[in-house]
Amino acid sequence: MSNPIRRLLIIRPGGLGGAVLLIPALRALRSALPDTELHWLIAPGDRPIAALVPYVDELIETRRPSAFAWLSLAFALRSRRFDAVIDFDHRSWSTALLTWATGASVRLGFYVPGQWRAKLYTKVFWKYFAQHEAQEYLGLAGMLTPIVFDPTLEMWESDAGRSEIAEAGLPDSREAPLVVIHPGCGPQGTPLEWPLPNFAVLAHWLIQKHGAALVLTASAAERKKSADLNKL
């Protein structure tokens, strides 16, 4: 029996962290659906990561947030006649509406108690926030087709990235692991943040076990968090 899903749209725009955590689900879908065209809707800021992912056939960028831009994108997606859409966002009303607007016969997304978004999907995966985000992404992907449940994260380096590492005087990541730790999640991100002592334990383990070189980063508003972590 031939695969009835010829074109699959993946929606997860916004946030480099979310893009990285989505990679295992993209890998699983690519392996399970080798003949399916995989299209990934991303925000412009996601491109540095998304462009390196080998499991998708096309990246579709969102535009500046406005009613006209949203309607234009909705019509453009609908004209592509996707067979299935998976919305990996669990908060945005916009992504749920876009999923519905595609007109795809199969529309998957997260069900979060108290949200109405689930009514716009044909199948839902209950999100309990009890698992790692990458595992929940895999659970949602598995609603579409049987997949290999492998949450291993992957990253790829670009030539531009290696040049930036060299210019900053950091060790070559091909010789020893180079790990960047960004302990803050923005001014409103405190509920999402790991406690600093946890980061400290991880950092010491990376150094002792793998000889990693660590780099702490922070936005202007998060410098104190990184400075406090550096003392631990």
Image (cartoon, rainbow, N blue to C red):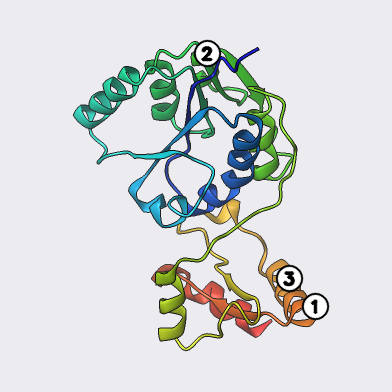
Of callouts 3 and 2, the N-terminal one: 2
Query: In the rendered image, which quarter is residue 166 located in?
Result: bottom left
Which residue is under mark 2?
Answer: 119
For residue 202, the mark is 3
Q: Are marks 3 and 2 in contact (CB under 8 Å)?
A: no
Circle 2 Cα neighbour tier, 10 Å, few/some/many (<14 / 14–19 / ≥20): few
Does residue 9 sit above or below 134 in this rendering? above
Q: Is mark 2 on a helix, strand or loop?
A: helix
For residue 209, the mark is 1
Q: Nearer the viewer, residue 113 or 55?
A: 55
**Where residue 184 sits in the image (x, y, percent)?**
53, 64
Of callouts 2 and 1, the N-terminal one: 2
Q: Nearer the viewer, residue 27 or 61?
A: 27
**Where residue 31 sits in the image (x, y, percent)?**
65, 36
Which residue shows up at 33% across the image and 48% down it?
A: 44
Which residue shows up at 54% across the image and 33% down it?
A: 88
Is residue 127 among what the camera can see?
no
**Where residue 161 sits in the image (x, y, percent)?**
44, 71
Q: Is mark 3 on a helix, strand or loop?
A: helix
Question: Depth-wise, is mark 3 or mark 1 nearer the camera?
Answer: 1
Circle 1 Cα neighbour tier, 10 Å, few/some/many (<14 / 14–19 / ≥20): few
Does residue 131 sit above or below 11 in this rendering? below
| Kind of residue sitting beneath label 3 | Leu
Of callouts 3 and 1, the N-terminal one: 3
Which residue shows up at 27% across the image and 20% down it?
A: 75
Which residue shows up at 23% across the image and 34% down it?
A: 66
| Kind of residue sitting beneath label 1 | Lys
Q: Nearer the viewer, residue 185 or 171?
A: 171
Does residue 180 sit above or below 125 in this rendering? below
**Outermost residue, bottom direction?**
169
